[in-house]
Amino acid sequence: MAKITYIDFAGQSRTVEAENGSTVMENAIKNSIPGIEAECGGACACATCHVYIDEDWREKVGGPSPMEEDMLDFGFDVRPNSRLSCQIKVTDALDGLVVRTPERQA
Amino acid sequence: MSESIKTDVLIVGAGPCGLFAVFELGLLDMKAHLVDILDKPGGQCAELYPEKPIYDIPAIPMVTGDGLTKALLEQIKPFGPTFHFQEMVQTIEKIGDPLFRVTTAQGKVFEVKVVVIAAGGGSFQPKRPPIPGIEAYEEKSVHYAVRKMETFRGKRLLIAGGGDSALDWTLNLAPIAAELTLLHRRDEFRAAPDSVNKMKALVAEKKIKLEIGQVTALEGANGQVAAATVKHNDGTTSSVACDAILPFFGLTMKLGPVADWGLKLKDNELIEVDTESFETSVPGIFAIGDINTYPGKLKLILCGFHEGALMAQKAHRYVFPDKKLTFQYTTSSTSLQKKLGVV
């Protein structure tokens, strides 16, 4: 189990309990977190679950795979700490993770 | 106006549900034409996840989006559906009882007794980058597609993106543009390696420019762009003077013209149907698959298949008002097997 905090573009923060093995995207959808659309349902086939990883967590979360990098090309305002949240699996090591959602999804 | 195409049923959308509807309609002797904005059948299965596995098609433990599309095409082959790709249905007008005149944005006209909307998440349309005020330049100096290359002759072009569309148009337009800048957010490209090599050769010969970054603002007046502000990955910005911008950021789904067809919608994004026949608020127009909603609706391909089967029963009454429909199984009915071409 891990606590994940989503901070939206306006600065509002929401924290949820996430099960190991689930994705950061799935927990957002399950808890009706705004700012994440996940149009393709988690197939790494769109770029509408784009999040920015909090600087303190970048190392633990790691960078995107080449396929995810390709999909990020379809995102907007992509930054060095951008990830697609459907590709981040929750583990105990991510307890306390903070991600920010962009102004809008692609 | 071009001459109209007359058939029994027009299916809007050639995704899995639209394709399987051809089968269910065909068993009941109804001929179908399909219209789709993509250049191929399969809908989201073809466009979003051709290589991704699907695990919840009954009796098929695993199939890819592409595999499912191919299998459906094989299954509906006996019914000879006619496809109209790269067309988007624009209007549906009731002209008889039941008779509809359906027109596409590309100018095709259909006269059909039944319309089946199987449009999934709506029509795939180019993604609009979130650049403030970009709408004012669209169709004038910002283009999401190249219809006539001549439009761009002698102009200073800015092409944004890193996929095949961006690279192909860079290579095709470079010889006729006055100047061409390709802009991508990173120095790696998903486009075909051959195109990337050709592009890099043009850059080395100084025939085109390559910039790494993202457009954040546009300058210009009356729809005519003059320059784009580009933010680079190190945080610095620069200005690229240009007469036209071509952003290629892939496709997204928009409800599109469906909203204008006079159907009862829920939350302005899904079509309300009854669960007996999946008919909309307009008799003779049905909606199946992800685009419809009803109590308990699940957006699953298997639900769309079920909806198609029940839709066909009611559609039969409109197409053949005088014929009685007897329920038959493909396993045992020789008449169904003849239609399938297996006996």
Image (cartoon, coloured by chain):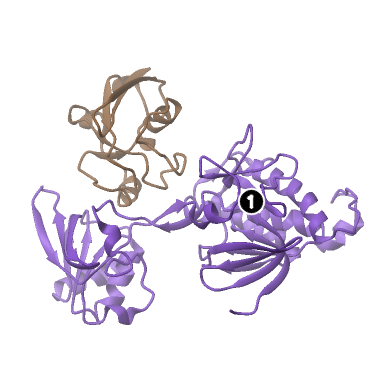
Q: Residue at x 82, y 54 (%)?
A: B317
Q: Which chain is brown?
A: A
Q: Quadrant of the C terminus of chain B?
A: bottom right
Quarter of the image that includes the N terminus of chain B: bottom right
Left or right: where does residue B174 sit relative to residue A39? left
Q: Secondary structure at mark 1?
A: helix
Q: Chain of mark 1?
A: B
Q: Nearer the viewer, residue A105 or B197?
A: A105
- Horizontal side of B204 relative to B275 (left or right) equals left
Q: How many marks?
A: 1
Q: Quadrant of residue B319?
A: bottom right
B129 or B340, which lies in front? B129
* A38 horizontally vs B186: left or right: right
The hue in which chain B appears in the rendered picture of the protein: purple
- Residue A92: name its quadrant: top left
> Residue B107, position in %: x, y?
54, 73
Q: Residue at x 40, y 39 (%)?
A: A37
Name the residue at 26% across, 72% down: B198
